[in-house]
Image: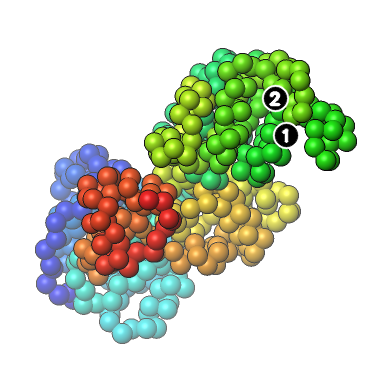
Amino acid sequence: MNQTAPSEMNPAPASVDEGRPVSAEPSAVSRGPRKVKLTSGRVLVVDDDDDMLELVRDELASRGFAVDVASTGGDALTALQWRECDAVITDVRLERESGLDLCERIVASQPDVPVLIMTAFGDLDTAVRAIRAGAYDFIAKPFKMDMVAIALRRAVQHRQLQREVGRLRDALDRAPTVEGVLGDSRTMRNVFEMVTRVADGNATVLVTGESGTGKELVARAIHERSPRSSGEFVAINCAAMPAPLLESELFGHVKGAFTDAKVSRSGLFVRANGGTLFLDEIGEMALEMQAKLLRVLQDRRVRPVGGDTEVSFDTRIVAATNRDLDADVAAGRFREDLFYRINVVRIHVPPLRSRGNDILLLAQQFLQELAGRSGKAVTGISGTTAERLLTYDWPGNVRELQNCMERAVTLARFEELTPDDLPEKIRLHASTRLSEGDDPEQLPTLDEMERRYIRRVLSATEGNKTRAARVLGVDRRTLYRRIHRLGIDDPGSAS
């Protein structure tokens, strides 16, 4: 096959296979070096030109691939049986059979191995036939080795992602879970450990994290694992009602305490006696109400609105917030004494975007639940769809993922979800990661790198520019200038 002169390129960064040496066992089809630092996956190259095989092998090896080679389709199939490969690249014209025929045989026997076919530039008919034969991609000749390496890395990543999706589907029933909270990432395992450790006690717990991360589920898990599990779990959203109504809900009221108080009513502190009271979004509570709540938590007694008699209660308090209460205390928006009273033990629930493959684990769980309820024969997620799910930032966290999967299952036409089943904003989302890969044409400019990083910091600090400037190592004035120069949308009005 013909090829332009190979271009030089630094070895690829390490991947999950780093450090695994190529086997030194003899092979009639493998002529690669005996010891290669496997960083980009194992690739089988098929061509009947020995000189080209050696050239491609050396070029790919220098870019971090472990390379096996074969000169015929039969040798290639033997190689695949002898040792697992992450991708195959074959010339369309081989001495004994067509590369298209080889592609069909590989797809039939090992459908998870992506096949890339090399064909002459402009040969549209062959390219179409290659895709119909099940090829993952085709490469037009003449080509540069940098572009071949990029295409192979994408193919290898695609296969690894497909295998991971399958592994997670099989491992779903065995995945770590705490009363409905699912996750296998290190951060979620830390959450599970904390839930287990605090459940037996009576200490007040503060659960922090962004909206939609599952803070209430964590609070319920603490209750269900505690000696209070036979009692009631009572939840209230402190941001959903004004202070007078919240006071009545929490403390209760006596008949005639206000216009609509037709009868006396016990508050949630008393209702949850022997159980757990969950104060959601406690950071939104008005300062006047914070003072009253502090008194109740200190005395463990509550006086109904309009009443003269205090009532004792035995209720465990779990509070939650998506705000930075440390910053709110410093700014005078939250009482410091109340903060110390509720912040005895803190459990932080991480955002979904930082939980890695938990995204796919949760997606598969939602898929199974939703498909079961709707009666649709949807069983899995395609590798391309999984890639879209992992790329998206999930500002709405687990709640947004659940809504996404409900839509996808509703619209699904096949057994596996495809990218077309996803909402447009997820399907077309441009990643905010600092690096998109090794393709020079896709690498961002310095301004774009700075823009993405500032956006990520502002998102992490919930728009608080004082904290963001501190993280970035600049003063606020400099941050404002950069926000204006880079055209970054103001994520919030926090100072």
- From the top left corner, tell me how far across and down residue 390 is, in percent: 44, 53
Residue at (80, 33) in percent of width and height: 257
- From the top left corner, tell me how far across and down residue 294 is, in percent: 57, 25
How crowded is the residue under tag 2: few (<14 C-alpha within 10 Å), some, or many (20+)?
A: many
- From the top left corner, tell me how far across and down residue 314 is, in percent: 68, 16
**Could you tell whether 380 is left or right of 344 in the image?**
right
Q: Residue 156 falls in which quadrant of the image?
A: bottom left
| Residue behind mark 2 | 269
| Residue behind mark 1 | 249
48 versus 375 height, above or below = below
Q: Out of 83 and 486, give the one closest to the viewer.
A: 486
310 versus 475 height, above or below = above
Viewport quadrant of the N terminus: bottom left
Q: Out of 456 and 239, give the one closest to the viewer.
A: 239
Residue positioned most to the right: 262
> Can residue 469 be seen?
yes
277 versus 299 height, above or below = below
Q: Looking at numbered disc 1 in the image, what kind of residue is underneath it?
A: Glu
**Could you tell whether 254 is left or right of 71 in the image?**
right
Residue at (37, 80) in percent of width and height: 126
- Residue 50, numbered circle: none
Residue at (46, 44) in percent of width and height: 351
Residue at (45, 70) in percent of width and height: 133
Q: Residue 262 falls in which quadrant of the image?
A: top right
**Could you tell whether 7 is left or right of 74 in the image?**
left
Q: Looking at numbered disc 2 in the image, what kind of residue is underneath it?
A: Phe
- From the top left corner, tell me how far across and down residue 434 is, in percent: 29, 56
